[in-house]
Image: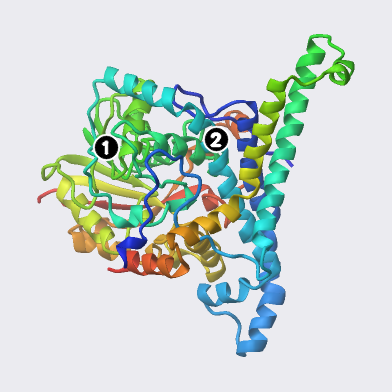
Amino acid sequence: MNQNIFQQAPHDLLPVGNHDDRMRQEFSKSFRQYIQNGLLPGLTPVFEGRVTRTFQKEHGRPPADRHDIRKAMVTDPYFQTYASSTRIAQELLWSSVIDPLERDLGPLTEKAETLSTQSPAMLKTSEDFDVPRYVSAIDIHCMPGGYASSRSDKDIFAGALYDRGVYLYAMGYMGPDNDDMGRSVCNYIKRNLPEFAPETILDMGCTIGHSTLPFKEEFPDAEVTGIDVAGPCIRYAHARAAAKELNVGFLQENAEETSFADQSFDLIVSHILLHETSGKAMPRIFDECYRLLKPGGYMIHADLPPFGKMGPFMQFILDNETYYNNEPFWGAMREIDQIKLASDAGFAPGTIRFDTAPMAVMELSEAEQAALTDREFVAGEYAPGGGWEVLIAQKGKTE
Amino acid sequence: MNMATEQTAPETQTPRHAKGKRPDFYATEGMDEAMSMIMVLASEFCTMRDRMDTIEKIVSDNGIDLESEIDRYTPTPESLNQREERRQSFFDRLFYVTQKKALEQATDDSGERYQDVLRDTAKG
């Protein structure tokens, strides 16, 4: 079988480490590939066979929803090995990056500070910032230390860890610059809203700005800003953008309630942000998007599809993240009526819809793609279907 | 939610474990640790194979008879120390889950706390 072997684009702040660190990182990435290609497909026959038979015998009916399926699957030894392997791969992945990062943190932190000092772009963080509990209570996706724990006003640990970790997690499918989501949303805008030329763009929950930077590349005249609640990620994002010579501002702000004035932006985007918030935060974020948008402006949130768009078995597979990968809002978020939330926030019902933004990395020419990847996407894998689900809504032009 | 159960990492220590109760996947006590150990070993095994492959390619590119060089090599005290450090840090990785369980005990990070967070974050 052909494997995806392309490498992350190097830059000054990336903690890749020495030969053995890199090989451990490669191992964790290969292990994830193997789990998806070699172990995941076996779950379907196991479920449809012995697991369903046992459930039927005990309940006198087949499993009806993802909760039934979960109850039936957790005692099955095949599922146990699948789920346990997925968790271990995640733990190996972070460990393999923490090793070199711990060693090189001093020089990397200095380098980040130098890069940031030289950049004209705005940087704002505060050690007194009130990090919401949905980010601080559990270390999301099992990243040790979480996004936001900060050891000093210069700390970039979480940002550097995330940059390398997300490349490994996505097995390279985020592209060499981890920017596939942003790039895919940009492509979506250019194709579906050809007349729309945003001059001010806000990326909410930007982490290290990996999805933010393509907006500056695709809309070079626009003023692009990324916000996140995590100080170490914002500092890293700012320095990383500076290393790539892109003038993008990064501010530590909470998307529920920012310090920007009304009608500050033409376009507000987010990438895999919403499932890392909460039931209380989500409507507030939609309200804030509405407040911050100029009349006629667009809000676009890219994530994985809501549960209503897939069958119960697929829901169950996705929902494993909730229970086994420290993603407390992953499942609950996919049950929320986001169309209604957007409508309640003030967006005109006729403009609110879900759509698919094809993954930019899958749309490259055949030759370019062959250089990056050689593998089909199937449901249940990373970014199922080869596209990102986008929720799009427009603010009325006459507000 | 009792805020006293919130974990805060010591200022200077590199975080090695993720906050949040680690689920048990197997009914058999100890099996989760064993699986983790096996995969860490597999990772080291692959890393070593990759390293040897790198060495062999470089050395043969430079025309050196590596086999007899290896047989003749006597480790210096410095090299013995390095090896010992490497092995100890290998054990840290090998007992990763065991360490995580001890940390959860020490910091009261429980399944109940995880469920509380799920409930709290889902609240509309």
The disc, 1 or 2, on the residue closer to the chain's N-terminal end is 2
Q: Where A270 falls versus A54 (above or below)?
A: above
What is the C-alpha distance between the residues marked 1 and 2? Answer: 48 Å
Vertical side of A284 occupied by A188: above or below: above
Report the colour scheme: rainbow
Image position, residue A390 (x, y; %) = 38, 51
Q: Which residue is mark 2?
A: A99
The residue closer to the viewer here, B81 or A38, is B81
Q: Secondary structure at mark 2?
A: helix
Q: Is residue A5 left or right of residue A395?
A: right
Q: Is residue A242 left or right of residue A199?
A: right
Residue at 41 percent across and 39 percent down: it is A158
Name the mark on residue A291. none
Whether residue B19 is visible to the viewer of this picture, yes or no, is: yes
- Comparing A369 with B28, the one in front is B28
Which residue is the site of mark 1? A195
Question: Residue at horizontal 49%, vertical 41%?
Answer: A166
Q: Residues within 10 Å of mark 1 (few under 14, many from 20)?
A: few
In x, y percent, where is residue A376? 63, 46
In the rendered image, the vertical position of residue A115 relative to residue A324, given as above or below: above
Which is in the foreground here, disc 1 or disc 2? 2
| Percent coordinates x, y for residue A122 in the rendering | 22, 28
Q: Amino acid at mark 1?
A: Glu
Kindly identify the amino acid type of the residue bearing the numbered disc 2.
Asp
Is residue A349 visible in the rendered image? The answer is no
Report helix, strand or loop for mark 1. loop
